[in-house]
Image: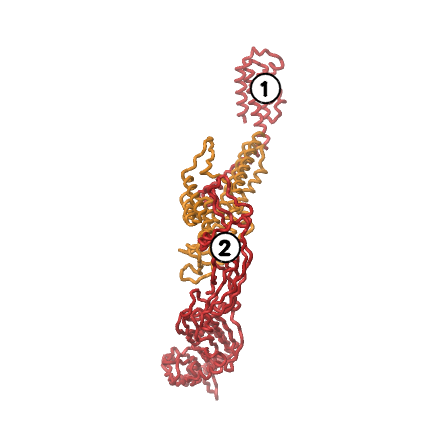
Amino acid sequence: MKTHGMIMGIVVGSALGFAQTWAADLSGKTADLPKRPTANLSGRAATPSPELVRASKTFERGNQAFGESRYKDAIQSYKAILKEDGVFAHVLFNLANAQYRDGQIGEAILNLERARVLRPRDPDIVANLSVIRKAASLFPPKNEPWFKAASFLSWNEWAWLACGALGMVCFFTLLRVMQPSWSFAFFNFILILVWLSALASMAGLWTTRHRAVVTAKEATTRISPFETAAAAFPVQEGEVVTAQAVHENYILVSNRLGKIAWLPREQAEIIISSPSQTQ
Amino acid sequence: MKTTHIFLAAICLAAVAEAQAANPVSVHAVLDPPQIALGEESRLKLVINAPSDAENICVPRVQGLELTYIGAGRSSRMSIVNGVTSSESSFTHSYSVTALQTGEFTIPMFIVRVDGKLYQSDPMTLRVLSSSAQAAAPLLSSVPSATAPAKVDSRLAFVQLIIPKEKLYVGEKTLIQVKAYFLAGQRATYAPPSVDTDAFAVSDFNEQPSKTQETVQGSSYTVLTWNSALTAIKAGRYPVDVKLNCVVLLNRRRSGLLDDSNSLFFNDPFFHRPSLLSSFFSNVEQRELQLTSQQQWVEAAPLPEVGKPAQFSGAVGHFQIQTSARPTQVNLGDPVTLKIIVQGKGNFDRVTTVDAISSEGWKTYPPRAKFSPTDAVGYEGSKVLEQVFAPQKADLKTLPQIQLTYFDPETGRYETISASPIPISVTMASGVQPLPEATASSIAPSSPPSSVAPPQPEEPSSLKQTPPKEESRVVDFAPNKINLGRLEPTLKPIAWNNWFLAVQGGLLLALVVLSLAAGRQQGRANDPDHVRLSTANKNIKTQLELMAQAKDRNDAVAFFAAARRALQERLGEKWKMEPTVITIADVNERMETHHPTNAIFAMADSVVYAGKAGSDVSLEGWEDTVLKELKRLENES
């Protein structure tokens, strides 16, 4: 029984740790790695990597340019971070703000959508997306109710949750093998439910993987993937469309009303793609 | 009797043969009627009086005439007059004769091969008159003078293109009508008409045509009418005609159309092609037609360069605009939606935007347009444009005035219409500082509403930059982040990687294996033999430890008590008995007398119960004996 209690303690402790991280995400109080080095297991302060130091300095330069209304300089700084140092939700957010101020509605919505992929519960991202769409008279993408539930966690959070839940089930089953008198049926039932929920949510998010944002100011859809083809329905800068096929320099897109037409590749960006390649 | 019948039959056959030999083969051709109007049809019948049909017919060619084969028929007659039997067979081949021009045509002789011999018909003469204009006169009166019906003499079906204007401006749109006439009582299938021109854009004929009945030259016609719109796209004078492909099913018996060659004429290369259907069903004929209207010339005049406003975007027609705004009381930076309704007639596709006369102090966004036509071809209707304006200054009193410039083809002039300015009240939200004038003007062309708060990099990084409550409520736009946040290796979710799927698969596999193992464990735990064995082994282990300790203390009583108990555990497991109730009597009963187990039990009883001196006993030797006996019993099946 003593061992049993210890295991329960480990499980509850892990859950609390996850919840704590989650709460930190909700409040936006993530650790500032370059400025506030964290302690490693040996107790000594961990030195931030040179890449993070460089990214932090570039980020500050971008913020300074933004404050001085030099939006193009700010955009350049933020893009440099994404290209050279990696993807940060905060950088995508600030980049979107700068692009919006610079009149790049489509790019701003694209980067806010990308930031939301990483931080779906960040209220700032959600609010700015809503404001920009409202100002540009754009409808938000059509989402089913289940999609809202699936979007409560990010892709990676669902993935880790699935791995963790299934791993815990395996662990409890191993304990049962070692000690048949112990029973974890209830815990395993809950964990299997969590695992299935995570899989279902990821399956739901998977259906939106081809969503793209129209970035061109004057985008033109055509009925065939040729420059000489007749124009189809109008699409607006910042509108979210779904890519369905690719033919040479054209992508077949459908809008929220289900209309389908071909759009030049350079006039739209897939949301979930590497920003460093597309910026 | 039978012999008499055979004799009579032989006489009849001989008489027929004699009659056939007496009737020579003759070929003659009949043209009915010998005189037709241009566009009408005459029927040529080639009659071959012969016992068998022609092996080959050489049809003459006549410049200006078209002879189309229709079909063949056979008739035979047998008569007996005063005992003399005569028989006649004739084969009739019918041809449709149409003329491509007026004049008098001589159709040369037909050469026919019958039974290996050549025969010929007499030449014929066909007169073709140009009487179609007179025949069409009643029909012409029913349509505008600019539209002449094409091939009105095609009495079975014909098509008209009606264009109300002979002169258009480039970009001007006008309604057109296509009317297809089918002789009443006939069934027809048809494709939408097509207009063959590259100088005009024509709206699709997608809608279902309206169906009416009209009488033309005394004949009743079913008329299908399509409405469309024609837009001039390049300057010049160009011909326009319309084509209509259709298939008409003719019922010969009911209409008698094929028998009345005067009433039909189809100036079409596909018209008299024999169809499969007509081959099988003699009373129904399927005819494929391509009806072509008469060409009409339409002049497209270029738009005048003189007086063309700079903001002219190509709208041609006649329009009016109305505007409304919502809300009319806003805070600085808040969006105002201006709704502009453009109504009228013309090419609405070029009415994509309207111009603000002066938008100083306003941030404008591209309008969003929606066109609602009131007719089927999009010529007339209303277009609603919603444009968002955001005030950049607090002293603005009215929304930017909107104007629309278009070319009116009726007056031939460019017109600019404007809507009255809409008053608006811009207030400064509490907690929001007005932007300096210079800043507002400098960012006006490309900046969004001034409500985006600038970042504050000097703020301690431990605190998230959160706008004041009041400002947040008013502005609704979150400010920049001031810390870098967490690094993500890539935007691509980890679940999209193969290793994630491998991990999930590995965990699932491990779970299956562990579940099977757990089930096996559970099964063994529920097996009484396994439980007895594991309990016995556990107890034996304990007794052996006690035995070893007793040996070290040279405590014979404890030693033999432990030894006997260890053996009881093993025997109990083997015999499926409670170990503590096994005595030496049970052992003697089930085992040989001189078995080591008996000796161990006897010795244990002696030492424990009879008080035999332990010093006389070699515990070392007895320990080996006990261990060997336990091993032997364990291995015993």
| Distance from Cα at disc 1 to Cα at disc 2 | 106 Å
> Label 2 amino acid?
Lys
Residue B42 image offset from top left, x and y in percent: 43, 82
Which mark is first along the chain, 2 or 1? Answer: 2
Q: Are marks 1 and 2 on the same chain?
A: yes
Q: Which chain has been coloured orange in this picture?
A: A
Q: Which chain has been coloured red in this picture?
A: B
Element marked by disc 2:
loop
Quarter of the image holding residue B555? top right
- Mark nearest the camera among 1 and 2 is 2
Q: Is residue B566 above or below residue B242?
A: above
Badge 2: residue crowd in 10 Å (few <14, some 14–19, many ≥20): many
Q: Which mark is residue B564?
A: 1
Q: Which mark is residue A100?
A: none
Badge 1: residue crowd in 10 Å (few <14, some 14–19, many ≥20): many
Give the chain letter at badge 2. B
Q: Nearer the viewer, residue B203 or A184?
A: B203
Q: Left of B101 or right of it: where is A142?
A: right
Q: Nearer the viewer, residue B175 or B131?
A: B175
Q: Circle 2 sits on which residue? A: B393
> Label 1 amino acid?
Arg
Which residue occupies the extreme bottom position in the image? B82
Q: Is residue B535 above or below residue A222?
A: above
Residue A60 image offset from top left, x and y in percent: 44, 43
